[in-house]
Amino acid sequence: MTTINNKHVLITGGASGLGRRLVQRCAEMGAAVTILDVDEAGAEAAADEAAARGAGPIRAFVCDVGDNKQVAACAADVLAAQGQVDILVNNAGIVSGRPLLELSDEHIERTFRVNTLALFWTTKAFLPAMIARGSGHIVNVASAAGLIGSPRETDYAASKFAAVGFNEALRLELQRSAPGVKTTVVRPFYIDTGMFAGVNTRFPLLLPILKEADVTERILRAIQRDTAQVDMPWMVRTLPLMRLLPVWAFDGLADFFGITGAMDEFTGRPAAER
């Protein structure tokens, strides 16, 4: 079991959306919380809000988690100000929501920097101390898109497939070398954070647009119970079984359930909020 009370929790992308709610809830549960985000004003506001709810120290640091040099420098500042990290939540993520040929090279590179490479940089920064003391927990917020691709998500799905693979390999490495350090991969369908504004679902009872608060509580429960995998909703768990089907049948099911058309009316957050 992993306790949150009196632990130091670091959350990337904590200035808004799911990350911000995790910051608030961890503060309420008695944790010291560190926020890493490129949005300085949003991160500071999230820290102030959390500080009013909790007893532990809450600090915000401006950091582009896709930049290994920034992460290394920021990690040194975090350790000096807040101490060793007990729970690392790799939550920062971005989405382009465009067909492949409408994606600039910069869009593609940015998606992989934030959604994939950042996992390496933050984990390498804080994992050694976890291994040294024989305890810790790393949460990697991936996506159901890490199990099934769909139109307008070539960069996003590829980055999340990589995140799922990263978590799996890391989990197996740690089982051998540091069994006291746990990992959790989170693979949700679309969440109502605003990041995926405009997405739709054909069968909301089977594949609902998830509530940010519900996903937050599931993640916190997974940390406390050392749950290795969180899939939301339950239907996400059927995706590996669907891959046993011929490709034409797999694609047909994805089309029937509306997965291939979910992003057709995607708008995302307004540019000023990204």
Image (cartoon, helix red, strand yellow):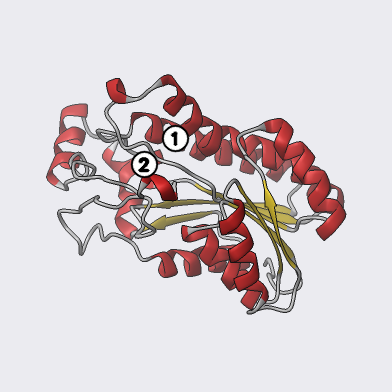
- Residue drawn at the location 32% of the way across and 34% of the way down: 153
Q: Is residue 177 visible?
A: no
Amino acid type of the residue that numbered disc 1 sits on in the rendered structure: Phe
Q: Nearer the viewer, residue 248 or 264?
A: 264
Give the side of residue 22 with respect to residue 102, left or right: right
Q: Which numbered circle lies on residue 161?
A: 1
In the displayed structure, 266 sits above or below 218; it is above
- Residue drawn at the location 44% of the way across and 46% of the way down: 274
The percent position of residue 242, horizontal first and vertical second, equals: 27, 40
In the displayed structure, 102 sits above or below 183; it is above
The percent position of residue 200, horizontal first and vertical second, equals: 20, 52
- Residue drawn at the location 39% of the way across and 58% of the way down: 193
Q: Is residue 134 visible?
A: yes
Q: Residues within 10 Å of mark 2 (few under 14, many from 20)?
A: many
Q: Which numbered circle lies on residue 145?
A: 2
The numbered mark, 1 or 2, whose residue comes first in the sequence reads 2
Circle 1: element type: helix
Q: Are marks 1 and 2 in contact (CB under 8 Å)?
A: yes
| Snapshot quadrant of residue 122 | top right
The percent position of residue 264, horizontal first and vertical second, equals: 19, 41
The percent position of residue 254, horizontal first and vertical second, equals: 20, 40
Amino acid type of the residue that numbered disc 2 sits on in the rendered structure: Ala
